[in-house]
Image (cartoon, helix red, strand yellow):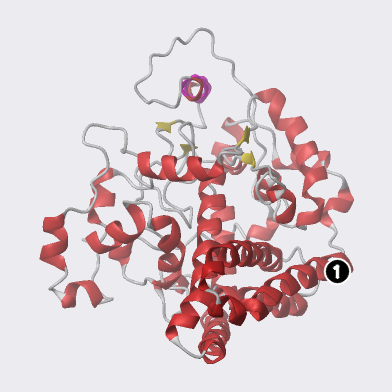
Amino acid sequence: MAPLQAARLSGVRSGSLPPSHGVSAPLLPRRPRGSKGFVRTRATTPSSAIARVASSKRAASGGKVGAALTLTEPQVAEVPSLRELRQAIPKDCFEPDTRESLKYAAVDLAWMFGCFAASPFVAEHPILTLPYAAVTGLAMWSVFVVGHDCGHGSFSKSNVLNGVVGHICHAPLMVPFYPWAYSHKQHHRFHNHRTKDMSHPWMKAEEYKETNAVVRALALDHWIGLYLGFPGYLLMEPEWSSTDGSHFWPWSRLFDRAPKDERLKCAVSSASCIAFLAGTFAFAGGPVNWAIEYGAPYLVFSWWLFTVTYLQHHDHDTETFEEGEWEYVLGGAETIDREFGLGIDKVTHNITDCHVAHHMFTDMPHYKLERATKAVRGVLEPRGLYKRRDTRDFVRKVFTLHEENGHCIDASADGGRPRATRAELEALLPNNNRFFTSDEKRQ
């Protein structure tokens, strides 16, 4: 179904993608991922309302797919247009304050580099490694959020300033700024689209099984994936890795349909990361010290990034949509505002509890999202399209949800998700040609 028809049938005006997303060109084609939502709905028919009622009742019953449901009279809620949502938000929320943005950047960078400056003392007293890693990793995550604004262009109106500050924020985190900004914009552009969304993959059981067994074992099957998943996503190029392509390699498939300058920009961003990494080794003076001073807080940062982004878009009642069923606002409404508590929401710039508004409109700086969230909530909540959840148990929640469902939509079906077996690993590991050859293609 054409996007215009889908928009009209779902009660949303045409042109429901924000102009900043550049919707005139199709996204690079990707292999089918499978519907992540544990419930598949059609946004273009009244039956979607039935499915949404079912999913909400399923959530109330503990999220069990097999839970008995009693459907009475489904209430069909019209999905608001993007224009309606935007008009509800105060206009000044879309105007970045460069001085305010720079203030947040300065504070967070000072916090992070202050921790790094204290790291030699920690290396001399290894008993301090865990608290040091916890504080520094959280600082790194807060710095990432500031760089995240730069990637969206909501840090300032200057592309040059956004690029400079974005690299200063992301290079210390081993995140190539320009390639990440490119793939992340596609994630926003097609949030909860079954095959076009980027970042956390939506996979059926058969697609999950096709993923390389080593990748499954290290990044998808078990709790260790909460720490290794994000660096693996950025690094891995082969299609059997189920990533979007390497963010470090200028000739990556990630850029097959991207503007030509993205490959050059990738080289610049990757060089900045490599330069900073080399600096950490020189500063540490040895592998053991490096592991304490940089490696440990990096793993905490990686955990924070995985935890926040996974919980923003995953729960037992999450829905995704096929081509012809998907619509921008409906997909964005599957985003979840989660309250982490303990001051974390504030320290990390409300990326946890104000994410729905951000997913609808990426051109708002983080320090204006609370007001925007109140406005967006006022439009979506009366229609049953707003999700806000108390997630002060976020540590338990992310480990439990990842263990139960991970990235496989069939995890609750008979047999569960096809985790890597010892036999698969023994058959694969000795065959270096298969594991390390980047041109192996999925049949």
- Range shown magenta: 48-58
Question: Relative to 222, is 96 on the left or the right?
Answer: right
Which residue is nearer to you in this view: 69 or 111? 111
Q: Is residue 64 above or below residue 155?
A: above
**Residue 259 shows in the view:** no
Q: Quadrant of residue 73?
A: top right
Place of residue 22 in the rendered image (x, y in percent of width and height, measured from the top left) = 63, 61
Place of residue 350 in the rendered image (x, y in percent of width and height, measured from the top left) = 72, 50
Q: SS class of the residue under badge 1?
A: helix
Question: Which three-letter amino acid code belongs to the residue tagged 1?
Answer: Thr
Which residue is nearer to you in this view: 198 or 412? 412
Place of residue 298 in the rendered image (x, y in percent of width and height, measured from the top left) = 52, 69
Q: Quadrant of residue 205?
A: top left
Q: Residue at x 39, y 41 (%)?
A: 35
Which residue is nearer to you in this view: 210 or 139? 139
Report which residue position mark 1 lands on: 98
Question: Relative to 188, is 210 on the left or the right?
Answer: left
Question: Relative to 37, is 173 on the left or the right?
Answer: right
Q: Is residue 384 above or below residue 169?
A: above
The quarter of the image holding the C terminus is bottom left
Q: What predominant SS class does the magenta segment belong to?
A: helix
Neighbourhood count class around disc 1 (C-alpha, 10 Å): few under 14, some 14–19, many 20 upward:
some
Q: Residue at x 16, y 62 (%)?
A: 425
Place of residue 80 in the rendered image (x, y in percent of width and height, measured from the top left) = 69, 33
Q: Is residue 151 above or below residue 413?
A: below
* 182 magenta-colored: no
Q: Quadrant of residue 219?
A: bottom left
Q: Is residue 274 above or below residue 292?
A: below
Which residue is nearer to you in this view: 273 or 331? 273
